[in-house]
Image (cartoon, grey):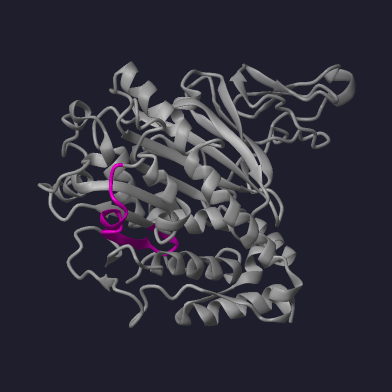
């Protein structure tokens, strides 16, 4: 039995006991398998439509470790193109973003339009006369879909439809991104930085690791960056929205409770939030919510909460960030971090939200600098000889029967399995259970996408 098979056996058998083998965070065989079984098959977030608004706009993004061009063609359609020339496999896109009518390979000059079609090459008649251009264009992702302007792609033609893949998580994406008719847009370019950690640590954290807030982020409360006391902040729900996808709400018990509403967004903006696109239940949850943190499997995370980078001069305001945990080898992750705003916010509100986000959830932000240090050592432990020889299992038992105060909520109005309070790790167990199934399911087949 290979080391990866042994680790997957341990994971599958151990989850019911709340155990996760440390080796999945550091084993090379596991990582190589992830690139094919997870990133080669699942729906992966790439960009937001507001980043490529005009015809010819493009951004360069990744699925797993591979580059893809996300581009809007002359008819306004969005394409996801593998960044490799058909002639010799040379990278054809040499900029992270821009606007163009074509992509030209620097090696032999093969030229492609924004649909990915081959449109020409130097000395075509002499070199390739008689060869059809059709069938020699850039390779494309198997499928591309957009949800609330969020562009996802999959390399697997057998993948379920995006909304089926999202399952119950779509209800919660609607809750945040569909609060008003204007929708969201990206402000600034995405931040990118690499740390010596495994990509799963970020997904694990944003699936709903709230237990670390009072220790790792204690200083954030001390400097007044976050307006809700720690114990109150832990009151809320953990939701396994659907297999693999999990989230957490810090939430007031009733809408009359003091404290921030609608994730801390300004009151005049919140007055535009209505039920034109969402239900009364969704609006009520958003109204009472202080924090929403979520992870769409495998590596797309969302965070909305009130923050300030300078509590002395600026009160907290609603900050919304989306991010991906890009695999960069078994021992590294490249973090991509975008800041979002609602389109109908005033320029001053957008600027305030952006600055508050930069000071807290960015490569130099207080939260980010806290989080990344422990993740580095998680990866180091996963790669260690000692973890392998000692059969080292990590404890994910919080919220299991008889462990802690969290209890399942029978009357939660949204989809999925909900627990009150946030002292709970079922959301992470949900992530790893789907992960284990994806790592082993046969090509063309898929794990169950609902809990029924």
Judge by depth and name the residue closer to the eye, 122 or 450. Answer: 450
The vertical placement of 389 against 189, above or below, is below
Q: Residue at x 41, y 44 (%)?
A: 220
Q: Quadrant of the C terminus?
A: bottom left
Q: Residue at x 54, y 31 (%)?
A: 190
Segment colored magenta: 227-246
Quadrant hosting residue 5: bottom right
Q: Is residue 440 left or right of residue 131?
A: left
Magenta stretch: residue 297 in it?
no
Residue 387 is at least partly visible in this image: yes
Instruction: Give residue 412's position: percent from left, percent from top.
Output: 20, 63
Instruction: Give residue 196's position: percent from left, percent from top.
Output: 68, 51
Judge by depth and name the residue closer to the eye, 397 or 59. Answer: 397
The vertical placement of 385 against 133, above or below, is below
The vertical placement of 147 against 379, above or below, is above
Instruction: Give residue 131's position: percent from left, percent from top.
Output: 80, 30
Q: Quadrant of the N terminus?
A: bottom right
Q: Residue at x 49, y 67 (%)?
A: 434
Q: Residue furthest right?
A: 126
Residue 153 is at least partly visible in this image: no
Number of numbered callouts drawn: 0
Q: Is residue 441 left or right of residue 452?
A: right
Magenta stretch: residue 238 in it?
yes
Q: Is residue 262 left or right of residue 390?
A: left
Quadrant hosting residue 93: top right
Instruction: Give residue 16's position: percent from left, percent from top.
Output: 45, 81
């Amino acid at each position: 039995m290979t080391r990866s098979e042994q680790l997957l056996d341990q994971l599958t058998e151990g989850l019911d006991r709340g155990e996760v083998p440390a080796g999945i965070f550091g084993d090379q065989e596991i990582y190589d398998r992830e690139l094919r079984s997870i990133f080669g098959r699942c729906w992966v977030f790439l960009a937001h439509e507001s980043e490529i608004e005009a015809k010819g706009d493009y951004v360069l993004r990744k699925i797993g470790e591979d580059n893809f061009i996300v581009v809007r063609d002359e008819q306004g359609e969005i394409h996801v193109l593998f960044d490799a020339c058909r002639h010799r496999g040379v990278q054809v896109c040499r900029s992270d973003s821009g606007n163009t009518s074509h992509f030209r390979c620097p090696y032999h000059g093969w030229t492609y339009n924004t649909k990915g079609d081959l449109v020409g090459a130097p000395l075509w008649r002499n070199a390739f006369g008689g060869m059809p251009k059709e069938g020699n264009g850039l390779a494309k992702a198997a499928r591309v879909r957009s949800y609330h302007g969020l562009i996802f792609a999959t390399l697997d033609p057998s993948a379920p439809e995006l909304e089926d893949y999202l399952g119950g998580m779509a209800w919660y994406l609607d809750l945040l991104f569909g609060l008003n008719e204007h929708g969201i847009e990206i402000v600034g370019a995405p931040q990118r930085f690499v740390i010596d950690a495994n990509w799963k640590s970020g997904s694990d954290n944003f699936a709903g690791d709230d237990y670390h807030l009072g220790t790792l982020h204690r200083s954030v409360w001390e400097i007044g960056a976050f307006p809700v006391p720690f114990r109150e902040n832990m009151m809320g729900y953990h939701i396994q929205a659907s297999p693999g996808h999990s989230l957490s709400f810090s939430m007031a018990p009733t809408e009359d409770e003091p404290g921030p509403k609608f994730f801390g967004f300004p009151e005049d903006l919140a007055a535009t939030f209505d039920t034109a696109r969402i239900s009364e239940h969704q609006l009520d949850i958003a109204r009472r919510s202080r924090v929403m943190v979520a992870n769409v499997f495998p590596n797309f995370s969302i965070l909305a909460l009130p923050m300030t980078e300078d509590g002395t001069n600026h009160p907290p305001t609603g900050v919304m960030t989306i991010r991906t945990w890009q695999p960069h080898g078994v021992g590294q992750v490249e973090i991509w971090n975008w800041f979002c705003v609602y389109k109908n916010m005033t320029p001053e509100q957008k600027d305030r939200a952006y600055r508050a986000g930069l000071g807290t959830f960015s490569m130099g932000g207080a939260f980010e600098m806290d989080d990344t240090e422990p993740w580095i050592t998680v990866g180091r432990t996963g790669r260690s000889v000692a973890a392998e020889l000692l059969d080292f299992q990590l404890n994910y038992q919080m919220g299991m029967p008889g462990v802690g105060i969290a209890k399942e909520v029978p009357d939660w109005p949204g989809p999925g399995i909900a627990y009150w309070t946030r002292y709970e790790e079922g959301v992470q167990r949900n992530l790893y259970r789907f992960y284990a199934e994806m790592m082993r399911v046969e090509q063309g087949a898929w794990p169950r996408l609902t809990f029924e």
